Each structure stands twice: as structure tokens, then as C-alpha cells.
Image (cartoon, rainbow, N blue to C red):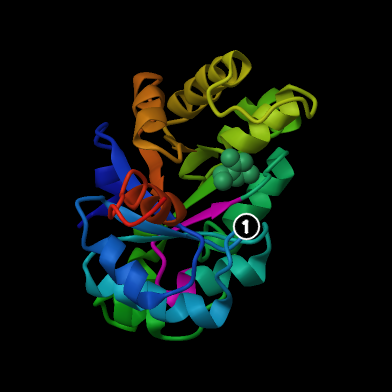
Amino acid sequence: MDLRARLHDGTPFCFSWMGMPGSQLAGQLARTALDGVCLDMQHGLIGMDQANPMVSAIVAASKPCVIRVLWNDPGLIGQAFDMGASVVIAPMINSRAQAEALVKSAKYPPMGQRSWGGYAMVQASGLSAADYLKKANNNTLVFAMIETQEALDLVDEIASVPGLDGLFVGPSDLSIALSKGAELNRTSVANIAAMKIIHAAAEKHKLVSGAFAGSPEIAKEYVKLGYTFLAAVTDNDVLRLGVSGWNSGFQK
Ligand code: 3PY
Ligand code: MG
């Protein structure tokens, strides 16, 4: 699959969001109708040793693996792509300089300074090492998270950074920031207004608009705003809601 073309075709790309370790779980989620699986290595409980077999399980199911890294750090970003992730999302990008650093970590020269090494990514791509190098800057995508007032104020500058592929809204942090700590509401009036501005900046610079939705209902709301790259369900909710309403008749 040409993931870049798929993400620019204008139709929603909905993926699951995992915070729990487990390659069986990752493989199961990769084999659903959803378009991909994201490992959350910022707030999730997935360590590097646990992520590696999860990425393999997702790739084995022929689905793209997305990783939200712990921070905008060259080592973490390189490691995520080297494991075989096709998309990296970096949290809390608050300035043009931070977005430039993100691209530098994610792309090989001449676009950036990603360091070569490992072979899991070559294996996952099904290409030779030489072809992987030729195609990597096109085949791997990097998203900057917009989730603060600062980032919102500078969103046009951030979106204009060459080599950046998309913006990804963190609506929880954004709502906390916009309400000055008063509320956690992914669909607050202020959030929706901010998300319209963020989408417009992405569109202007031909970037993909993404967001953490966390539920199919919220994903549908964001699709109406023009967002197409959406974390639509979480592993936690799949478990929690999967048994909600279940009653064997033996319970009090
Ligand atoms: C946010 O909503 O702030 C995120 O980072 C997504 O979990
Ligand atoms: Mg966040």
C-alpha cells in the first residue's frame, strides 16, 4: 500500500490506539476492519522491548504501524522507525524550531538527519536496504502534535515546516490548555473552534489532518471538520465496553 497516497486520498483512515503491551492484542487489533494500529509510547505502558514484537505482529497483518513517541527526541524517533513503524507522532510540538527538529530526526538526508542502522525496518518494508533508503522519506510519515495554546498560536508556522507530513491534535491536552486547567473535554466549543484553525493550517500547507478521537462518535465529529487520520478506538475501551452490559445472571 502507498500509505502517503492513502493518507492524502481524502477518506478517513481510522486506527486503534494501544496503551497496553502485548503482541497478541496488537495482532488482533491489526486484523480488524480498522486501517492501522498506534502504539502510544508516551502515556501508554508499552516499553521498547514490548513494542518490538507488537510492531512485528501489526506488520505481519499487513497493517501500518503508527507510534506516538515519548517525546520529540531524535533517538526515540529513529528507534520507532527502525522497529518498522510507518508513522511517528510526536507530542507537544510548540514552535517552528521544534517541528524542524522533528523532521530532522525523522527523515534521511537531504531532508533531515535520520541515522541509518538496524534492519527490522528494512525487513518490515519488504525492500532491499538500498531501496528502503531511496523510498524511506516518502514511505514514512511524521506528525506534529498540536495540543497547547502556544502551538495553536503558531500553527501556521509549524505547518509550514518542509518535510512535515501532518498535524495531529491532542484534544485532551488542548482542552486542558484552552480552559486553563478547568476541563477535560475533547469536544468543547473552544476545542472545536481551535480544531477548525488547525485543519485550515494543515490544508493550506497540504498536510494530513489527524486527531486522537478515542471513540467512533468523536471520530465522526472530527471527520465533519475535515480530519482524516483518526485514532478512533482505544484498547482500554475495547475491553471495558466489550463487557459493559454483560450480565450472566449470576451477578447481584
Ligand atoms: C491528547 O488528547 O492530549 C493526547 O495526547 C491524545 O492522547
Ligand atoms: Mg496529549
* Residue closest to the eye, 219 or 132: 219
State how many labels appear: 1
- Residue that appears at 41% across and 29% down: 218
Q: Position of residue 146 (x, y in %)?
A: 61, 36
Classed neighbour count for the residue bearing mark 1: other residues with Cα under 10 Å, few (<14), some (14–19), many (≥20): few
- Confirm if mark 1 falls within 8 A of ligand 1: yes
Q: Is residue 88 magenta?
A: yes
Asked if residue 107 is positioned above or below residue 129 in the image, the reply reads above
The furthest residue to the right? 180
Q: Is residue 167 left or right of residue 219?
A: right
Is any atom of residue 202 visible in this view? Answer: yes
Amino acid at the residue labelled 1: His
| Residue that label 1 marks | 43
Q: Is residue 52 magenta?
A: no
* Quarter of the N terminus within the rendering: bottom left
- Residue that appears at 74% across and 22% down: 179
Q: Position of residue 27 (x, y in %)?
A: 29, 70
Q: Quadrant of residue 224?
A: top left
- Residue that appears at 51% across and 38% down: 167
Q: Of helix, strand and loop, which one carries label 1?
A: loop
Asked if residue 223 is positioned above or below residue 77 in the image, the reply reads above
Q: Position of residue 119 (x, y in %)?
A: 41, 85
Q: Quadrant of residue 181?
A: top right
Q: Quadrant of ligand 2?
A: top right
Is any atom of residue 147 visible in this view? Answer: no
Q: Is residue 12 left or right of residue 44?
A: left
Q: Quadrant of residue 185?
A: top right
Asked if residue 202 is positioned above or below residue 250 in the image, the reply reads above
Q: Position of residue 14 (x, y in %)?
A: 31, 43
Asked if residue 116 is positioned above or below residue 201 in the image, the reply reads below
Give, as a single range, the part of the protein colored magenta.
81-90
